[in-house]
Amino acid sequence: QVQLVESGGGLVQAGGSLRLSCAGSGRSFTDFTMGWFRQAPGEEREFVARISWQGTRTYYADSVKGRFTISRDNTKNTAYLQMDSLKPGDTAVYYCAASPLASGAAREVDKYSHWGRGTQVTLSS
């Protein structure tokens, strides 16, 4: 098992930036591909970004490509999501998740076995 705790959400103006963190504990952090997902009210949870266990491969949803950056520090058992040029459409609860699959296969929600409780990101226009 691995426990995940997100932090760093909040209220930010459009065009601003936030950095989300996901702290992992328990089973070895490097066993997992790490992903970020988000869910807006009334919407399904959607993929945002994911990163391989070594941090060498990253993948992004088209909606955030060029604005968000996923990274990880395995020495700290922590994954990050740097969000820049935020837009009102980015408002959602952001979830960190861990998948035992290789990063190339871990795109969908059901490929992730461990989830954090989420952190709210709200954009003000």
Image (tube, grey):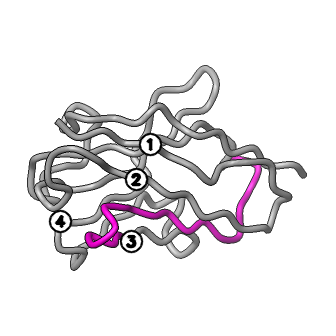
Q: Amino acid at mark 4?
A: Trp
Residue lying at 38% horizontally and 62% vertically, measured from the top left: 79
Q: Earlier in the sequence, mark 1 or mark 2?
A: 1
Residue of label 4: 53
Q: Earlier in the sequence, mark 3 or mark 2?
A: 2
| Alpha-carbon span between mark 3 and mark 2 | 12 Å
Q: Earlier in the sequence, mark 1 or mark 4?
A: 1
The magenta segment: 72-89
Indicate left or right for 119 with 86 as reference: left
Q: Name the one closer to the observer, 25 or 113.
A: 25
Q: Amino acid at mark 1?
A: Val
Q: Answer whether labels 1 and 2 touch (C-beta < 8 Å).
A: yes
Is label 4 in a helix, a strand or a loop? loop
Tell me where residue 75 appears, x and y as whole percent: 27, 72
Among the 4 quarters of the image, the one containing residue 60 = bottom left
Residue of label 1: 5
| Alpha-carbon span between mark 4 and mark 2 | 14 Å
| Alpha-carbon span between mark 1 and mark 4 | 18 Å
Residue 23's label in the rendered image is 2
Is label 1 in a helix, a strand or a loop? strand
Residue lying at 22% horizontally and 31% vertically, measured from the top left: 110
Residue of label 3: 71
Q: Answer whether labels 3 and 1 touch (C-beta < 8 Å).
A: no
Q: Amino acid at mark 2?
A: Ala
Mark 3: few, some, or many residues within 10 Å (few <14, many ≥20)? many
